[in-house]
Image: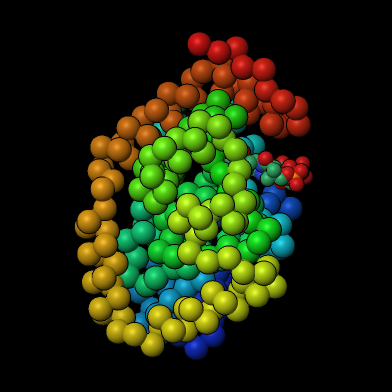
Amino acid sequence: MKFKNLKISRQERVAKVVIDRPKKLNALNRKTIGELHEAFSALDDDPEIRAIVLRGSGPKAFVAGADIAEFASFGPAEGRELAASGQDLLFNFVEKMHTPVIAAVNGFALGGGLELAMACHIRIASHNARMGLPEVSLGVIPGYGGTQRLPELIGRGRALEMILSGAMIDAERALEFGLVNQVTALEDLENHCLQLAQKIAKNSPVAIGHAINAVNAGSRISNSGFQAEIAAFGTCFGTADFAEGTTAFLEKRKPDFPGK
Ligand code: COA
C-alpha cells in the first residue's frame, strides 16, 4: 500500500497507521480521508492483522481537525456532502471495523481529529494532548459524528459544554471525563498502545469482531442523530457566520460574527 499522507508499518500482527501531514498538523483533507478508508479496509480484510494503532505524525498533533482551507469556499450542498461522505468513508467505517483501532492521541485532537479518535475503539493520550470541538468558533458544528459520539462517551452536559464553548480540555480532564482510557508520557505513548494492541492480537479475532458488533448494536446513537448533524452542518455553510469564521481562521485573526 502506497499513500501520500499516511505511513503504514507492521509489527507481528499489529499495524501502525500514521497520518503524515505534520506541517498542517495532520488536518484531514479529502485525500487523507480517502487514503484512511483504503488503508483501513485493506487492514480489516487482512487475516494477519489483529489490531491497529493510529497516531498523528510529529510531537504536536494527532489531528487538528478537518482541513479548513479545503472547505472554506464550500456552499450548503457541498458541506452536507462533505459530512455525509466523511462519516461513511471514515468515521462510521472505523467504528464498525472488526479489527480494533486504538487512537494514540499524541497532541492536539480537535474537531474532526477528536471525532476520529472517538470513532476508534480505544483512546490513549499523552500528557501534552489537548482535545476539543472548536467548530462553533468557525461558524459551523461538528460534522463527523461529534454531536452524537461525545455525549455518548462523556454525558450530555459535559459534551454540550465542550461543543458550545469550543474550549479544549487537557489529557487529565479527558481521563476524568472518560474521553480517554489512559494517559502516558509522550515518549511512552506509542509503545504503550502497541503493547495493548499486541495483547488484543492474542485473543480470538472472531470473538473480537462479534464483541465490537454487540457493543455497537447497544449504542444509544440513532441514525437520525447523524442525519440531523449532517443537515445542520450543511446549513451552517450558507451563513455569514461561517464565511466570517473560516476567513478569520485563514487570515489568522479573531472572528467578528454578524450573528442571528
Ligand atoms: N485545517 C487547515 N489547516 C490547519 C488546521 C486545520 N484544521 N489546523 C492547523 N492548520 C495549519 C495552520 O493553518 C498552519 O498552516 P501555515 O503554517 O501554512 O499557516 C499550520 O497548520 C500550523 O498551525 P498553527 O495554527 O500555526 O499552529 P499553532 O501551534 O499556532 O496552533 C492550533 C495550533 C491547533 C491551536 C491551531 O492550528 C488551530 O486552532 N487549528 C484549527 C483547529 C480547528 O478549528 N479545528 C476544527 C476544524 S473543523
Percent of width and height locating residue 172: 59, 56
Q: Nearer the viewer, residue 8 or 111?
A: 111
Q: Quadrant of residue 213?
A: bottom left
Residue at horizontal 68 percent and vertical 22 percent from the top:
255
Q: Nearer the viewer, residue 161 or 23?
A: 161
Q: Nearer the viewer, residue 79 or 96?
A: 96
Q: From this view, report whether residue 71 is shown above or below residue 18.
A: above
Percent of width and height locating residue 103: 51, 64
Residue at horizontal 65 percent and vertical 75 percent from the top:
188
> Can residue 156 be seen?
yes
| In-image side of 56 versus 122 (left or right) | right
| In-image side of 122 versus 26 (left or right) | left
Residue at horizontal 56 percent and vertical 44 percent from the top:
132
Q: Nearer the viewer, residue 83 or 101?
A: 101
Q: From this view, report whether residue 96 is shown above or below residue 7.
A: above
Percent of width and height locating residue 47: 35, 82
Q: Quadrant of residue 192?
A: bottom right
- Outermost residue toward the front? 176
